[in-house]
Amino acid sequence: MRFEGSADYVATEDLRVAVNAAITLERPLLVKGEPGTGKTVLAHEIARGLGLPLIEWHIKSTTKAHQGLYEYDAVSRLRDSQLGDPRVSDIANYIKRGKLWESFAADTRPVLLIDEIDKADIEFPNDLLQELDRMEFFVYETGETVRANQRPIVIISSNNEKDLPDAFLRRCFFHYIRFPDPDTMAEIVEVHFPGIKKRLLSEALSIFFQVRDVPGLKKKPSTSELLDWLKLLLNEDIDETVLKERDAKKLIPPLHGALLKNEQDVHLFERLAFMTRRDGR
């Protein structure tokens, strides 16, 4: 069982090596990188490439580790007992399986995505150590032990918003996805826009990377924003000569709302444009 990428996802060699190493070691693959580098999509493509089902657990700031195992709905059971519902005799009726339980109970080895783990409380990763190590957990309400039918392929993504505990890191295989270089980005664009004009792509990528390099930019545009921008350029039939006439470090790009996502960055480019016009007089 080896991941080789797919026709819809450009996986660099070092990323493919990391995925296959994690599968061989049967350890979670911890993937870090700035937003827009394809961390979440990676899990989808691994599942698709290996022909396995995908189970997704998207983490929020309020998410607790036990929710990945199960949740006991005591309120519903109390209400049903007051109404004389016969379901109350079996407490299992009020146990809701979490994403880890789903992955443990799957008939086919699944890919389990734990997405943006760094959004949760700092203790969240440590609270999952035993379950991810032993691939089992105990349900106190029913007295049963849930064991994985087969070890899922676990992909854990992080935007590096906070440090993860050392004990957790020791149990993972780590890979940092670097932001694509221009050549890799051109490959990614070709997947989404087959046959795109080379000159248009060249000028668009030049502006895109210049925008990312502007000092003081609050939010650098990501791959998904580049793809949105290119879709608009193609839809509006904007010629590469229009892009070539503009210096992205000085003038705001056309249809910039796809690239710049806050007023501070827009104002930054407007100031640069004003200074350029003034100095050019």
Image: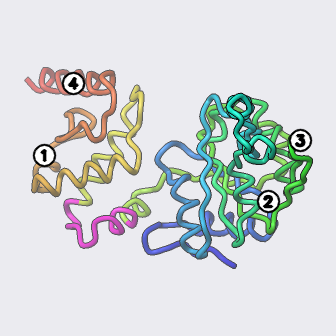
Which mark identifies residue 245? 1
Q: Which residue is mark 4?
A: 270
Between label 3 and label 4, give the one nearer the viewer.
Answer: 3
| Sequence-first disc among 3 and 2 | 2
| Sequence-first disc among 4 and 2 | 2
Image quadrant containing the N terminus? bottom right
Specify the farthest residue to the bottom. Answer: 1
Q: Which kind of residue does numbered mark 4 sit on?
A: Glu
Tell me the CA gap for discs 4 and 2.
48 Å
Q: Is residue 192 magenta?
A: yes
> Picture quarter containing residue 195?
bottom left
Above or below 41: residue 267: above
Between label 2 and label 1, give the one nearer the viewer.
Answer: 2
In percent of width and height, residue 182 lies at: 39, 57
Q: Is residue 122 magenta?
A: no
Q: Which residue is mark 2?
A: 27
